[in-house]
Amino acid sequence: MAGVSSFFWCPALVAADPVVDRAEAQKRSASNANRSTNLRLPRFVSLRADPINMRAGPGVRYPVEWVYMRRGLPVEVVAEFDTWRRINDSSGSDGWIHTSMLSARRTAIVIGGLRPIRRINEDGGEILARLEPGVVVSIQRCPAGSFCQVEAAGILGWALRDHLWGIYPGEVIE
């Protein structure tokens, strides 16, 4: 009976091995992907055009999971494979976009509530405008400190970097 018992346990042990799903396999391949640039990872870029297809994997044979319809939207590049970049967006979605659809131009998206754009980079500075969440701004520069100079709808002013998604804490842009 001991021989029969061990015979039935072996398949159970094999079946207990973890099954790797598609998303996990893609994450592993992304982390080990051949980097095609020497640029820092992760890094922020923006969408060059619209519409742009975000795919499940690095190639046109992978299904389209999302279509971006907003030129200039900031995205974070987290991996590279040949001419494809794995990106995250501000909502947490991730997938692959061809490098020709990305721009090095720095933009950010306003997060939180209604956010002021000030004339000077101080908390007490005159408010030029208030931006709603989701507004995309062009980053002009972000010196060390709390503020970034941004442009939105022809208005040039200063926004708190904590109110923006598209710049890392402490990152300096000149």
Image (spheres, rainbow, N blue to C red):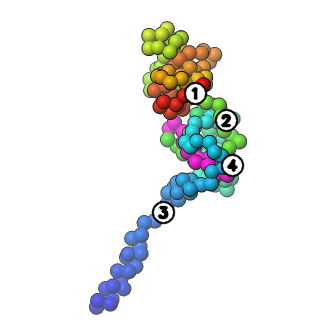
Residue sitting at x 52%, y 12%? 120
Q: Nearer the viewer, residue 46 or 91?
A: 46
The image quarter in which residue 66 lies: top right
Magenta span main SS: strand
Q: Secondary structure at mark 3?
A: loop
Label of residue 173 in the image: 1
Number of residues whose C-alpha sits closer than 10 Å to that of mark 1, classed few (under 14), some (14–19) or many (20 or more): some
N-terminal of the pair, mark 1 or mark 2, is 2
Q: Residue furthest top?
A: 126
N-terminal of the pair, mark 1 or mark 3, is 3
Q: Is residue 52 left or right of residue 146?
A: right
Q: Mark 3 highlights which residue?
A: 20
Amino acid type, residue under disc 2 in the picture: Ser
Amino acid type, residue under disc 1 in the picture: Ile
Amino acid type, residue under disc 4 in the picture: Thr
Q: Nearer the viewer, residue 27 or 172?
A: 172
Marks 3 and 2 sit apart, C-alpha to C-alpha, by 34 Å
The image quarter in which residue 68 lies: top right
Amino acid type, residue under disc 3 in the picture: Val
Q: Position of residue 166 (x, y in %)?
A: 54, 32
